[in-house]
Image: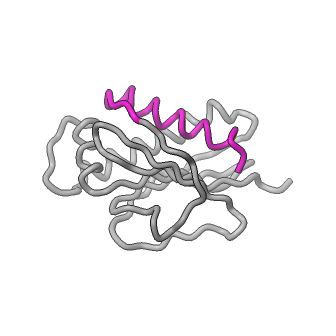
Amino acid sequence: MKSEYINPFIKATQKAFRELMHVETKPGGPRLFEAARDYLEVTAIIGLAGEVTGAVILSFPSESCLRISRAFTGIESDAVDDVAVDAVGEVVNVIAGNTKEDLLQFRIYISLPKVVFGQYDLRFPRDTPMIAVPFESDAGSFRLIVALKESPG
């Protein structure tokens, strides 16, 4: 995957966390996705379609999910609940929407976000490049995973 495709997602993630939650984030180095290591306990997914296809994924340890939900909503929770699910779903939605600004050369349509928990196996077509970017923040660690390929035609 070209860096000009992944960098807008990193930029949009930092912008969303800074503007929505007043949380500064620090991305680590992008690397190839490794399914067994890269999905954490709570994962928000939003599909991309159009001239590119794939998904934007945010994956959190439960504790980071709760801190991010609290920063976003102001509501304290002891466990991942509907509020936390809605919060991380909305954050991934904002990231996907903001990324569209930097990828205007493609007509990108975004799906509604989905959130999954625990042990799961998300699969993408074999020829879809996937890059994982670890992030650190005051609200905890998380991973941005981008699966993206240009549609033929």
State the extent of the magenta-drawn residues as a range. 1-25
Judge whether 116 appears above or below 76 on screen: below
Q: How many labels does the image show?
A: 0
Tell me where residue 143 appears, x and y as whole percent: 44, 51
Tell me where residue 93 appears, x and y as whole percent: 47, 43
Q: Which of the 4 quarters of the picture holds residue 68?
A: top left
Residue at point 62%, 43% (across, down)? 6
40 left or right of 38?
Answer: left
Question: As drawn, which residue projects farthest toward the right?
Answer: 153
Q: Nearer the viewer, residue 26 or 40?
A: 26
Question: As drawn, which residue projects farthest toward the front?
Answer: 29
Q: Nearer the viewer, residue 144 or 115?
A: 144
What colouring does the structure picture have?
one colour
Tell me where residue 12 appears, x and y as whole percent: 52, 34
Q: Most prominent secondary structure in the magenta stretch?
A: helix
Residue at point 77%, 54% (across, down)? 151
Q: Give yes or no for residue 45 being in the magenta stretch.
A: no
Residue at point 68%, 62% (across, down)? 128
Q: Give yes or no for residue 15 being in the magenta stretch.
A: yes
Residue at point 22%, 56% (across, down)? 81
87 left or right of 120?
Answer: left
51 left or right of 148?
Answer: right
